Amino acid sequence: MIAILDYDAGNIKSVEKAMQLLGQEVRITRDKETILSADKVILPGVGAFGDAMGKIRQYGLDEVIHEVVHKGTPFLGICLGLQLMFERSDESPEVEGLGILKGEILRIPEGKGLKIPHMGWNSLEFQNNGRLFKKLPSEAYVYFVHSYYLKAADESIVTAVTEYGTQIHASVESGNVFACQFHPEKSSDVGIQILRNFISI
């Protein structure tokens, strides 16, 4: 069973549908026992960093997430879900993130011809043999929607980068913890393969 964490964020239904398409039993939940008994856990998210952290703390999900990670359950953050796993964000400087991984979330710099938010398809450059990207061609294209990007403190956890005004750490892997800035559930066949790879871990 795959638990999708419910903290009133967007894009939960699209993640649920993608997982059901792959034949998975899915539960959208904020119940602690259900989450801790799951085989895998997904933290999706669309919206503002500070609001999301407020909801996560309101529902007591911050402690549950740390427990899930500590016990070794495969855990996947998507889009805002990736950002929340780090220490801080330019979007809400006064709000602490989950701090599961070291690094910060920065505003994408303004640049000639660049629209912010960064919205659309960009190619990934793979590195550090990320398990989410098995059986994928190099330069695979995925779908992004974001105004802020990850700069991880430890580049050895970065498994994919992309360029949009700066180098963006687009995906990370550390032990049982995985995260993508892009939306695999909206990234066509490439995204489905990424989710299939997560299921197989």
Image (tube, rainbow, N blue to C red):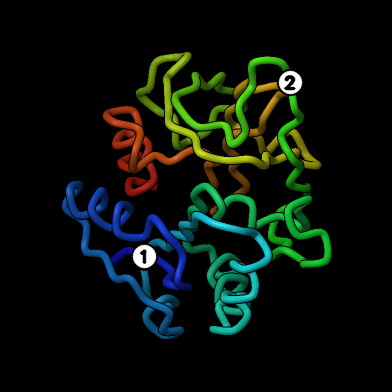
* Measured Cα–Cα span from mark 2 to mark 1: 43 Å
The residue tagged 2 is: 111
Give the secondary structure at mark 1. Answer: loop
Is 162 situated above or below 191?
above
Is 18 situated above or below 32?
above
Q: State the residue at coordinates (44%, 24%).
A: 121
The answer to whether residue 110 is left or right of residue 56 is right
Is 105 situated above or below 123?
below
Judging depth in this view, the residue of 190 and 71 nearest the camera is 190
Measured from the top left, where is residue 50 in percent x and y?
A: 68, 65
Which mark is drawn over residue 100? none
Q: State the residue at coordinates (78%, 56%).
A: 88
The answer to whether residue 169 is left or right of residue 43 is right
Is 56 situated above or below 156?
below
Judging depth in this view, the residue of 89 and 60 nearest the camera is 89
The residue tagged 1 is: 39
Residue type for callout 2: Gly
Measured from the top left, where is residue 85 in percent x and y?
A: 64, 57
The answer to whether residue 110 is left or right of residue 54 is right
Quarter-of-image position of residue 63: bottom right
Measured from the top left, where is residue 118 in percent x and y?
A: 57, 32
Give the secondary structure at mark 2. Answer: loop
Disc number lying in front (2 or 1)? 2
Mark 1 burial class by Cα count in 10 Å: few <14, some 14-19, many 20+: some
Residue type for callout 1: Asp
